Image: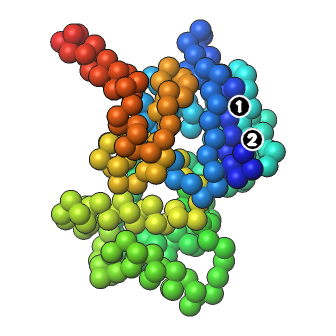
Amino acid sequence: MTGGAIIYLEDVTVDYDGFKALSHLNFFMDRRELRVVIGPNGAGKTTLLDVISGRVRPAAGRVIFGHATDVTRLRENDIVALGIGRKFQTPSVFVNLSVWDNVELSLKRHSKGVFAGLWESADAADERRRIAETLERVGLAAKAGRQAGVLSGMTDEETARTGELLMAIAADRSVLVIEHDMEFVRQIARTVTVLHQGTVLCEGPVAQIQNDPRVLEVYLGQRKETHAVR
């Protein structure tokens, strides 16, 4: 296992009555890394999250969190207590609160969410400084007092900044994102992992992934099959 890894899946297999949702999967991500996982339907993306969060126990393999904790031996609530949280579907903000309040709330929440406890407790002045720096970094300082929900109705650039706001909030965490929108992937990803048939097909920077013939074959092949059904 890599010394800097925060999560490591070793030879993980999940079998649903003969269908291997994950097949001898090996996967790891580093501390404070933002990793994006993509893949066609049925590739094993959701199962990957289910295994890490404890919703599904693999038939074989280990899931190591931190230095040596095998989460496959723990209950879901114990996994949450370790600091592993899960947010379903579309990244969202509290639309009726200001942009500033959204970031401030992420510092103070003590819940199962992926934004809980992102920073260690600090005094109020330090928190205000962190919030201001975060908003300045993603270009939203001038809109700190505006309702976060209003941003989603603005320009494409400002909508992208809403995504950047969420990523900035998570800057001190390891974040695993399952995503289908390749434009969004290009905005946020440094390393992309492509799953196919329950295992890692390839991995690397966005540009490399987009030009990988194996990825093109998997996605284009899926589209051809769809057209054929029609």
Q: Position of residue 106 (x, y in %)?
A: 52, 69
Query: Label 1 is placed on what type of residue?
Result: Glu
Residue at the far right: name it.
68
Q: Is disc 1 placed on a helix, strand or loop?
A: strand
CA gap, disc 2 to disc 1? 9 Å
Front residue of 64 and 149: 64
Query: Which mark, by number, is residue 152?
Result: none
The residue depicted at 79 percent of the width and 49 percent of the height is 67
Q: Are marks 2 and 1 in contact (CB under 8 Å)?
A: yes
Label 2's element? Answer: loop
The vertical placement of 217 against 50, above or below, is above
Residue 218 horizontal side relative to residue 80, left or right: left
Kindly identify which numbered label has been placed on residue 10. Answer: 1
In front: label 2 or label 1: 2
**Label of residue 1 in the image:** 2
Picture coordinates of residue 154, whole percent (x, y): 19, 65
Q: Give the residue displayed 32% in from the left and 42% down from the top.
A: 181
